[in-house]
Image: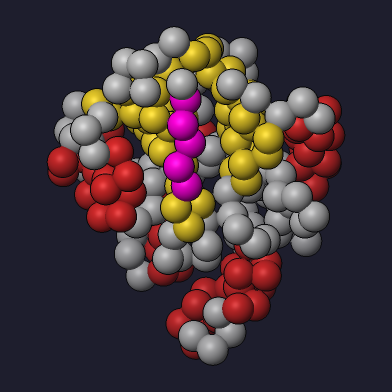
Amino acid sequence: MLEIVSHVNSIYNSISYVLLEHGTKECWIIDVGDFDVIKSLFDGYNLRGVLLTHVHYDHIYGLNELQADYPDVPIYTNEYGAKNLVSPIENLSSYHGEDFILSRTNGVKIIKEGNVILIGSYSLLVIDTPGHDYSCLSFCVDNNLFTGDSYIPGEKVFTKLQNGNKQLAEYSCQRLLRLGEKCFIRPGHSISFENCMNNYQADSIKKVIFDHLLQEKYVHD
């Protein structure tokens, strides 16, 4: 049996998912935010890997904490994501005052469209879904479709950040909608990124970051 547990993280309501394979006692994580909370969700399970829907700060900021506890656990992303893990500008962490750089890059594994990863006795399919960012991947396993920020039900894909592409986002979204007809959609946020930013307007630091992203060269018109 594959059980899926979710946690809504403290930054922008991003969602981390923990996949628990009860038969083999294996565990996988999709996106890593508040790792101090996430690790309590797989007590007694063997963490086998981390899958990244994309490499933006709100989906990766717990990775170094995870690597401190699990230095040999592989992290799966595409070639763009691998580069972004060591670039604070590309992963947007520099705008949060964090300058996130992955501490152990030798554990990064490159995946792409059509790759299949075994989650215990279950097969997980990798789907290339650029648009929100070139590092975007979605994952389908046991009728669950993990879409990250490539598709959030009821919301438009946010493409105004660097490396956003409206045309690619529309194409990826249509692919996911077709797949989603037979799957349970598990998005990357509990609400849209843009609405998250609106909720943070009282926080002047976050508002400055958002305004900067919308006005500077890193944002597409």
Residue sitting at 78 percent across and 38 percent down? 173
Q: Position of residue 185 (x, y in %)?
A: 68, 39
Position of 193 compared to 102: left or right? Answer: right
Asked if the magenta segment contains residue 4, the reply would be yes
Q: In terms of depth relative to the viewer, which is nearer, 104 or 48? A: 48
Residue 124 locus on image (x, y percent): 53, 18
**Magenta segment, principal secondary structure?**
strand
Left or right position of 104 against 15: left
Q: As rendered, which of 159 and 39 lies closer to the eye? A: 39
Q: Position of residue 142 (x, y in %)?
A: 59, 21
Residue occupying image coordinates x 65% and y 77%: 198
Give the image quarter of residue 107: top left
Visible in this render: residue 170?
Answer: yes
Q: Nearer the viewer, residue 40 or 115?
A: 40
Q: Is residue 22 above or below residue 36?
A: above
**Residue 31, picture quadrant:** top left
Residue 44 lies in the magenta-colored region: no
Query: Along the line of sight, which residue is nearer the eye, 90 or 68?
Result: 68
Relative to 81, is 92 above or below?
A: below
Q: Position of residue 190 (x, y in %)?
A: 60, 58
The residue drawn where x is 21% and y is 33% is 44
Q: Is residue 108 visible?
A: no
Residue range (magenta): 2-6
Q: Is residue 56 left or right of residue 179?
A: left
| Image quarter of the C terminus | bottom right
Image quadrant where residue 146 sits: top right
Residue at image position (42%, 66%) is: 10
Q: Is residue 71 left or right of residue 85?
A: left
